[in-house]
């Protein structure tokens, strides 16, 4: 197998400067998502420490989302190295995550409104990633097979 390509992954040999910039922006958005997620976790800690109610859902979500950001950051790095499979994963997650996060937060009684707003703000950079992964530069860098 050629060291520059992976037949299972359909790695392109080169990524254009425009695609590189888009992937760098996506990486920065994922980093921002992680920072905002960590800030949301800190907010939950502060709220709990001041005696206010924090339910299990809030603790679990607040703890998991920064960890998920690290995973997505790693997948984004693989996409930046030319992995089509990693690109597809980032592209898919960037669409599904905001819908799932915001949708679940809208279920009455799941979390207080302040937490739903905080989680919505946290996921805004992921929405930007969804936009970037559907842009012309990345579509050209990672064309659909077939």
Image: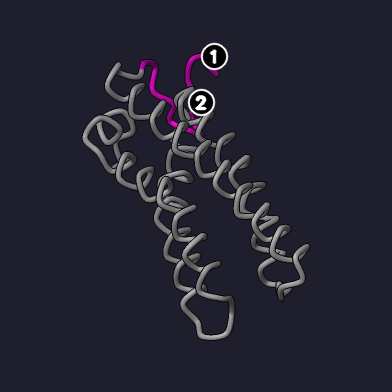
Q: Position of residue 45 (x, y in %)?
A: 73, 58
Q: Position of residue 6 (x, y in %)?
A: 51, 25
Does 27 sit left or right of 22 as displayed? right
Residue at image location 47% in from the left, 65% down from the top: 117
Q: Position of residue 115 (x, y in %)?
A: 55, 67
Residue 19 lies in quadrant: top left
Does 76 sit left or right of 14 as displayed? right
Residue placed most toward the observer, 5 or 88: 88
In the picture as drawn, the residue positioned furthest to the left comes out as: 136
Give neighbour class at mark 2: few <14, some 14-19, many 20+ (Cα, 10 Å).
Answer: some
Residue at image location 25% in from the left, 30% down from the top: 137
Q: Position of residue 57 (x, y in %)?
A: 68, 72
Instruction: Determine which residue is flagged by label 1.
Output: 3
Instruction: Determine which residue is flagged by label 2.
Output: 6
Provide the residue span drawn in magenta.
1-14
Residue at image location 60% in from the left, 54% down from the top: 40
Gap in Å between the C-alphas at discs 2 and 1?
A: 7 Å
Q: Is residue 11 highlighted in magenta?
A: yes
Q: Is residue 59 above or below residue 17?
A: below
Residue placed most toward the observer, 55 or 60: 55
Q: Answer yes or no: do the residues labelled 2 and 1 have beta carbons within 8 Å? A: no
Does 41 sit left or right of 137 as displayed? right
Residue 144 lies in quadrant: top left
Residue 26 lies in quadrant: top left
């Amino acid at each position: 197998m050629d060291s520059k390509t992976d037949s299972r992954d359909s790695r392109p040999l080169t990524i254009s400067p425009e695609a590189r910039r888009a992937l760098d922006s996506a990486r920065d958005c994922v980093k921002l998502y992680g920072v905002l997620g960590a800030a949301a976790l800190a907010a939950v800690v502060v709220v709990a420490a001041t005696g206010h109610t924090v339910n299990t859902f809030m603790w679990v979500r607040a703890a998991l989302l920064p960890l998920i950001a690290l995973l997505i950051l790693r997948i984004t790095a693989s996409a930046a190295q030319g992995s089509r499979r990693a690109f597809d994963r980032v592209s898919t997650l960037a669409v599904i995550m905001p819908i799932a996060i915001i949708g679940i937060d809208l279920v009455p009684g799941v979390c207080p409104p302040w937490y739903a707003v905080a989680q919505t703000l946290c996921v805004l950079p992921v929405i930007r990633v969804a936009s970037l992964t559907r842009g012309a530069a990345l579509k050209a860098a990672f064309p659909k097979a077939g």
